[in-house]
Image: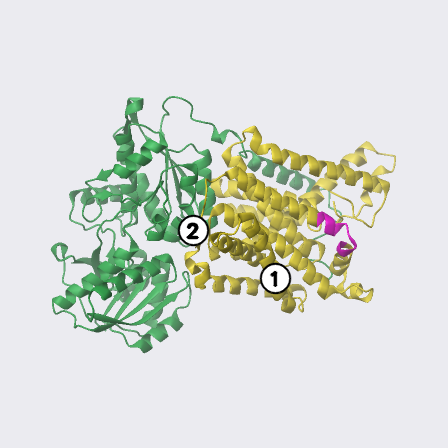
C-alpha cells in the first residue's frame, strides 16, 4: 500500500495517502459489517480471515521483509492459543488472556530464535520444522494442557459471534499497524538489508542476529495473539490443530500467494486463502489440495510477486496505456517490485 | 541470505503469462462467489420440501474409513425412510423426505469445527449428525449450543463431551468408561468360571486421549470393586497416530503380564498389533478395546488378529430381526455386509432423529431437540434393542464382547446368554 521509505518521490507519497485512505475505509467497512445484518456465515468467514490476516502479516515481517523462511509459526499460534486458554480457564479476562498469549509466544520465539538464528537459509528453515514437531509432541503429552485430549475453555456468558469478530478484527488491525510501522522505519530498512545480503548489512553496522531476534519476537507476539483469539472463539483447542505443521505451512503460504515483503500482499493472500480454501474443501474435498497446489504453482510460476504483484502489473499496464507516449509507463516500470506496496 | 528463495521480486513476465494470470483471477472470483451470498437465505414461512440434515464426517484422512462407513449407515437409513415417503411432520400435514448436506472434514479438528459452523449457520438444517471419533466430536460439540441446532454423534463416545452441561448435543455411543468396565467384567466372569486363574497380571497400553483415559477408568473401577481378581502391572499411554510402538511394547514385555489390554483406534490397532506380532510378543488374551473385528484389520493382520477380543457397541450377528434386516439392506445397497459397528450407530442416529421429529410434529429446532430428549427407539440395532439418551445427552446401551476366530469368524462370548462360541482364554502360539 505505502511506497518504501527509501523512495520519497511525491508520486509515492500520493500513492501512500491513497493507500491509507483505502485502509481506513476498509477498517470502517469491517467495523460496520455486523451492524448491517450480514449472515452469520459471512461473519464467521470474515472472523477466520482476520485471524489469518494477522498471522500472515506477522510471518511476512520475518519471511518477507527479513528473508528468514520459518516453517514453525504454528508454535507461536499454539502457544498463544494455549496461554489464552489456560488463562481464561484460570479466570483471567479473555482480552488480557489474548495479550498474554502474545507475550508468551514472543518469549517462546526468543528461546527458539537464540539457537536457530545461528543457522542460515535452508538450515534455519529445517530447524524450525523440527522445533514445530517437537513442541507439538510435547504439548500432546503435557497434562497441564490437557495433553492429546485437547483443552476445553470454560465459557461464561452467552456466546456472541460479533464480539469474537471484533476481537479478531482488532488483532488483524494491530498486525497491520505494526507491519506498516516496521516497514516504514529504519528498523524495517535494516531488516530489508538483512534480506538482501546479511553480510553486507553487518558491514554497514546492522546487527543481523539481534534484529532477527527482535522481528521474530514481534511476529511471534502477533501470531500468538491471533492464536489466543482463535482459542477464545473455538473454546476447544488441540495440539494436532493449533501446533499442526499444516498450520505452519498455511501461515507461510498466505504471504506467498499475496506477495512477500509487501503490506497488502499478506492481507490479500490471507483473504484468498481462507475463502478459497473453505470453498475448495466444501466443493472438491477429494481434490482440494491438488487444486490448491496447482493454483500455488501457477502463482509462483507466473507471478512470483503474488497477487499484490499481479495487481501492480495490471495497474502499471493500465497506466502505461493511458500515458502512452508521455513516458509515464517507463516511470511506473522503474518502481521497485518488492517495495512496501 | 540473499532472499527468501520463494520469489520476492516479480521481474518481467513473458506476454504468454497474462492469460494464465487472468485465469487465476477468474478462478479466485468464481470461488469467492458463495462468500456471504444467499446461501443463508431463510427457508421462509411454511413447510420446506425436505428435512435438511447437515453431516460432517471424516471421509478422508486418518479416520476416513470409519467416517465413510458412518455416512453409509446414515444414507441407508435416509433412503429407507424416504422410500416410505419420509418423516411425518404434523405441522406440515405431510411426510417430508430427508435431504443430506454432507461435508468431509478430512479428519482435521479445525476443519471439522469450521464445517459444523458452516452447516449450522448457513445451510438451514434441522439438525446435524456429525463426528466419527471422540477427538473430532470434542471439537464439534462446542458449536451446537451456540447456534442452537441439535447435534447427534454416532461415533464420539468419550464422556467429557457430554459432561460440559451442553443442551443441544446427543451421542449414540455408550461411554468408553463402560467399555473398560465391561471388558473387566467379562474377564472376571472367566475367573468365576475357572477359565482364568485369580490374580493374573494385566498390562494396559492406551491412547493418550480422553478415550484412552476413560477406558482405564473403567478398568480401574472394576478392579477396585473386585480386589485381588487381577493386578495391573503396566499402564502406559501412547501418542495417537503413531508409526512406531516398539518402545512401549518392549517395556510392556518386560512387565511380564498375562493379559494385554489396549484402547486404540483402527489405524493404531493395526500398526501396534503388527509390531506386537513382529516382536514375537504373546499374551494369554489380547484386546484393543472396541477394535478387533474390522475387516481392514483382519485383512492387514491375517491370523495375527485371531483370538483378539473386543468390547463393541454392535455386531452384525446380534440375534435381532431388525439387525438381520439392516444387514440385508446394507448388503443390497453396498454389496457387502457391515464389518463393524460404524454404520449401525449412524443408522440408528437417523432413526431416532426421525422419531424425534415425528413426536415434535415440527421442524422447529427446539422442538426437535426436546423430541430427542424424550425419544426412545425400541427396535434399535444396538445391544438391548432400546436407544434413548440420558440426561446429559449420551446413550447408555450395553456392550457385548466378541472374539475373533480363525477363518475370519467372530463369536459372541459375553454376556453368557448371547454366546455363540467358546471363549479361548489361551491364545495358541
Residue carrying label 2: B107
On-image quarter of the C terminus of chain A: top right
Query: Total marks drawn?
Result: 2
Q: Position of residue B150 (x, y in %)?
A: 36, 38
- Crowd around label 2: few <14 · some 14–19 · many ≥20 (10 Å): many
The majority secondary structure of the magenta stretch comes to: helix
Name the tint of chain B in the rendering.
green
Q: Is residue B281 magenta?
A: no
Asked whether residue B293 appears in the rendered view, the answer is no
Q: Position of residue B349 (x, y in %)?
A: 29, 41
Q: Is residue A14 above or below residue A298?
A: above
In this view, the residue in front, B329 or A4, is A4
The N terminus of chain A: image quadrant = top right
Bounds of the magenta segment: A179-188
Q: Colour of chain A?
A: yellow
Q: Nearer the viewer, residue B374 or B386?
A: B374
Which residue is painted at 46% across and 39% down in the image?
B118
Amino acid at each position: 500500500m505505502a511506497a518504501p521509505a527509501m523512495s520519497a518521490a511525491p508520486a509515492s507519497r500520493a500513492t501512500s495517502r491513497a493507500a491509507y485512505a483505502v485502509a481506513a475505509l476498509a477498517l470502517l467497512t469491517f467495523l460496520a459489517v455486523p451492524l448491517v445484518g450480514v449472515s452469520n456465515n459471512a461473519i464467521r468467514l470474515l472472523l477466520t480471515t482476520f485471524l489469518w490476516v494477522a498471522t500472515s502479516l506477522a510471518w511476512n515481517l520475518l519471511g518477507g521483509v527479513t528473508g528468514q523462511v520459518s516453517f514453525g509459526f504454528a508454535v507461536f499460534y499454539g502457544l498463544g492459543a494455549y496461554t489464552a486458554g489456560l488463562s481464561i480457564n484460570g479466570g483471567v479476562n479473555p482480552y488480557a488472556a489474548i495479550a498474554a498469549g502474545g507475550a508468551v509466544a514472543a518469549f517462546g520465539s526468543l528461546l527458539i530464535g537464540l539457537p536457530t538464528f545461528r543457522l542460515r537459509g535452508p538450515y534455519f528453515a529445517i530447524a524450525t520444522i523440527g522445533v514445530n514437531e517437537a513442541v507439538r509432541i510435547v504439548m500432546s503429552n503435557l497434562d497441564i494442557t490437557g495433553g492429546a485430549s485437547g483443552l476445553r475453555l470454560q465459557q461464561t456468558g452467552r456466546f456472541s459471534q460479533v464480539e469474537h469478530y471484533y476481537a479478531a478484527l482488532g488483532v488483524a488491525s494491530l498486525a497491520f499497524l505494526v507491519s506498516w510501522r516496521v516497514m516504514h522505519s529504519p528498523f524495517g530498512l535494516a531488516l530489508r538489508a538483512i534480506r538482501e545480503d546479511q553480510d553486507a548489512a553487518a558491514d554497514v553496522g546492522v546487527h543481523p542476529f539481534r534484529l532477527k531476534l527482535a522481528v521474530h519476537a514481534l511476529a511471534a507476539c502477533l501470531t500468538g495473539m491471533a492464536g489466543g483469539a482463535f482459542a477464545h472463539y473455538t473454546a476447544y483447542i488441540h495440539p494436532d490443530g493449533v501446533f499442526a505443521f499444516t498450520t505452519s505451512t498455511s501461515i507461510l503460504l498466505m504471504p506467498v500467494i499475496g506477495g512477500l515483503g509487501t503490506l497488502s500482499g499478506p492481507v490479500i493472500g490471507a483473504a484468498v486463502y481462507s475463502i478459497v480454501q473453505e470453498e475448495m474443501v466444501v466443493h472438491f474435498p477429494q481434490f482440494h489440495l491438488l487444486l490448491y497446489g496447482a493454483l500455488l504453482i501457477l502463482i509462483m510460476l507466473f507471478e512470483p510477486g503474488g497477487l499484490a504483484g499481479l495487481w501492480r502489473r495490471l495497474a502499471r499496464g493500465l497506466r502505461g496505456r493511458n500515458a502512452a507516449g508521455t513516458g509515464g509507463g517507463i516511470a511506473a516500470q522503474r518502481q521497485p517490485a518488492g517495495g512496501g506496496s | 541470505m540473499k532472499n527468501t528463495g520463494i520469489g520476492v521480486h516479480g521481474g518481467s513476465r513473458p506476454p504468454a503469462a497474462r492469460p494464465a494470470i487472468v485465469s487465476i483471477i477468474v478462478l479466485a472470483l468464481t470461488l469467492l462467489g458463495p462468500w456471504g451470498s444467499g446461501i443463508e437465505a431463510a427457508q421462509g414461512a411454511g413447510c420446506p420440501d425436505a428435512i435438511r440434515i447437515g453431516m460432517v464426517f471424516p471421509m478422508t484422512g486418518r479416520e476416513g474409513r470409519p467416517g465413510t462407513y458412518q455416512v453409509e449407515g446414515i444414507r441407508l437409513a435416509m433412503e429407507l425412510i424416504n422410500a416410505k415417503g419420509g418423516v411425518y411432520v404434523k405441522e406440515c400435514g405431510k411426510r417430508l423426505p430427508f435431504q443430506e448436506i454432507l461435508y468431509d472434514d478430512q479428519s482435521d479438528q479445525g476443519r471439522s469445527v469450521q464445517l459444523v459452523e458452516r452447516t449450522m449457520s448457513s445451510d438451514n438444517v434441522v439438525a446435524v449428525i456429525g463426528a466419527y471419533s471422540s477427538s473430532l466430536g470434542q471439537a464439534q460439540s462446542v458449536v451446537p449450543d451456540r447456534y442452537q441446532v441439535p447435534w447427534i454423534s454416532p461415533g464420539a463416545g468419550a464422556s467429557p463431551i457430554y459432561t460440559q452441561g451442553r443442551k443441544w448435543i446427543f451421542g449414540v455411543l455408550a461411554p468408553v468408561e463402560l467399555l473398560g468396565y465391561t471388558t473387566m467384567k467379562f474377564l472376571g466372569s472367566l475367573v468365576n468360571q475357572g477359565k482364568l486363574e485369580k490374580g493374573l497380571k494385566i498390562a494396559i497400553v492406551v491412547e493418550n486421549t480422553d478415550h484412552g483415559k476413560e477406558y482405564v477408568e473403567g478398568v480401574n473401577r472394576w478392579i477396585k470393586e473386585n480386589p485381588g481378581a487381577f493386578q495391573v502391572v503396566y499402564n502406559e499411554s501412547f501418542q495417537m497416530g503413531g508409526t512406531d510402538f516398539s518402545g512401549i511394547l518392549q517395556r510392556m514385555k518386560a512387565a511380564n503380564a498375562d493379559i494385554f489390554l489396549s484402547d486404540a483406534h483402527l489405524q493404531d490397532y493395526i500398526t501396534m498389533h503388527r509390531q506386537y506380532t513382529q516382536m514375537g510378543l504373546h499374551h494369554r488374551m489380547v484386546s484393543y478395546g472396541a477394535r478387533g473385528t474390522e475387516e481392514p484389520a483382519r485383512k492387514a493382520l491375517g491370523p495375527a488378529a485371531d483370538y483378539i477380543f473386543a468390547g463393541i457397541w454392535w455386531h452384525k450377528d446380534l440375534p435381532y430381526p431388525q439387525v438381520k434386516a439392516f444387514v440385508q439392506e446394507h448388503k443390497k445397497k453396498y454389496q457387502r455386509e457391515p464389518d463393524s459397528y460404524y454404520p449401525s450407530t449412524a443408522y440408528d442416529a437417523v432413526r431416532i432423529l426421525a422419531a424425534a421429529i415425528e413426536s415434535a410434529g415440527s421442524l422447529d429446532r427446539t422442538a426437535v431437540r426436546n423430541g430427542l430428549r424424550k425419544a426412545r427407539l425400541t427396535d434399535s440395532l444396538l445391544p438391548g434393542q432400546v436407544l434413548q439418551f440420558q440426561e446429559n445427552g449420551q446413550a447408555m446401551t450395553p456392550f457385548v464382547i466378541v472374539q475373533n476366530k480363525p477363518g475370519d469368524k467372530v463369536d459372541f462370548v459375553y454376556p453368557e446368554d448371547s454366546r455363540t462360541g467358546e471363549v479361548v482364554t489361551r491364545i495358541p502360539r
